[in-house]
Amino acid sequence: MKQRVREYWERHPNVLSRGMGQDPGTREFCEAVASHRYTAEPCILEMAAFDRWTGRRVLEVGRGMETDLRRFARGGGTVVGVDLTQNAVELAREGFVLFGFLGVFVVADAEALPFRDEVFDLVYSHGVIHHILDPQAAVREIYRVVSPGGEARVMVYHHDSYFAIVIVGMLVGPAMRAFLWVFPEGKLPRAIDRILPRRLKDMYLILAERGYSLARVLALSTDPSFPGAGNANPLSRCYSRREARELFSLFRFCETHIRQLYYAGFIPMGLRRWVEKRLGWFLFVRAVK
C-alpha cells in the first residue's frame, strides 16, 4: 500500500491541476497555484498563521511544491520541507529558487522523519496525514521532533462533514453502486456516457475494475483519480473531532477547528459560516507539546 501511495502522488502532484495552464517551474505557475489555493481555501491563512513564526524553525510534512512553506519563509521562518516523492521535492526547490527564499527539502517518509528530537518550533501538515499508511506513527514522529512548547498544526479530512455525509455518502456512493449494479461490465450506454461528468465517469471505470466500497469511493472523491495503473488515489481517511484528539493525545494540549464548505453555494451567506464551522470538510488540529 505504501508503494501505491508513493506511486500515485509521484505521478499526480496535487498542484499540477491548479497551475491554470502555466508551465511548472515558472513564477507564473507558482503564483497561479498560490492564488487559487488561498482564494478557494482562505481558512488556510487563518489556521496556519504564517506570519507568527518569524525566527522560528518550521517543518512542513508533505503537501507537494510547498506553497504554504513559501509563506512561512516569507514571514521570516527557518523552513524545512519533507515529502514522500522526489517530484514534489524538486518542485518545491524550484519554487524557492524562483522567489529567492531559502529552504531545505528532503525526500522522507512521515512515519520516520530524519531529524533529531525536539528541533522544530512548528510542524505543519495540510492534507497529508489522512493519506499515510500509519498515521499514528506519523503523529508520534511529529511529536518527537517538536520542541517543548512547540506546536503541531495539521489538517485532516472531517468525517462528520457535509462533503463526506451528503456528497459522498448519500449522492456519489449510491449513484456509483447503482451504475455498477445496472452496468457491471464497465461500459455505459452512449447517452449516459455523454452527460456524465468526466470525474464520475472515471470513478465508475475504476470501481468496475477494482470493486465497490464506500472507502474506495471516498478516496476517489477526495483527489483526482483516473483509470490506469497508479492513477487512482489509493488511500484517504476521515476523522471526527474525538478521533483527531485521540490521534494527538501525546500532546499536552489539543484543539480542533472545522472549516471549508464545498458544494454549498446555495446556502445563504449568513448561514453558511455557521454551517461551515460544524460541517466543513477540513478538520484543523492545533496541538501543543
Image (spheres, rainbow, N blue to C red):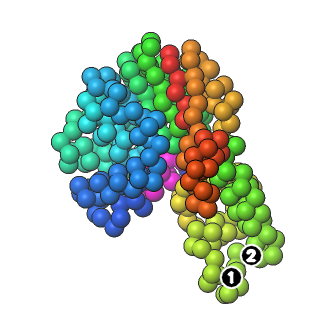
Marks 1 and 2, the one that precedes in the sequence: 2
User: How far apart in space, not on screen, are marks 1 and 2 (Cα)?
Assistant: 15 Å
Residue placed under numbered mark 2 in the picture: 185
Q: What amino acid type should be assigned to the residue bearing mark 2? A: Glu
SS at mark 1 in the image: helix
Queried whether the magenta region covers residue 29, the answer comes back as no
Q: In this image, 264 relative to 98: left or right?
A: right
Bounds of the magenta span? 5-13
Q: From this viewpoint, which residue is outermost toward the right?
A: 181
Callout 2 environment at 10 Å: few (<14), some (14 to 19), or many (20+)?
A: few
Kindly report the secondary structure that dominates the magenta region of the rendered protein: helix
Q: Residue at x 64, y 26 (%)?
A: 245
Residue 218 location in percent, x, y?
Answer: 66, 53
Q: Which residue does the numbered mark 1 point to in the structure image?
A: 192
Which quadrant of the figure has residue 193? bottom right
Residue at figure coordinates x 28%, y 63% from the top left: 23
- What's the amino acid at mark 1? Ile
Horizontal and vertical percent position of residue 124:
44, 32
Position of the N terminus, as image quadrant, is top right
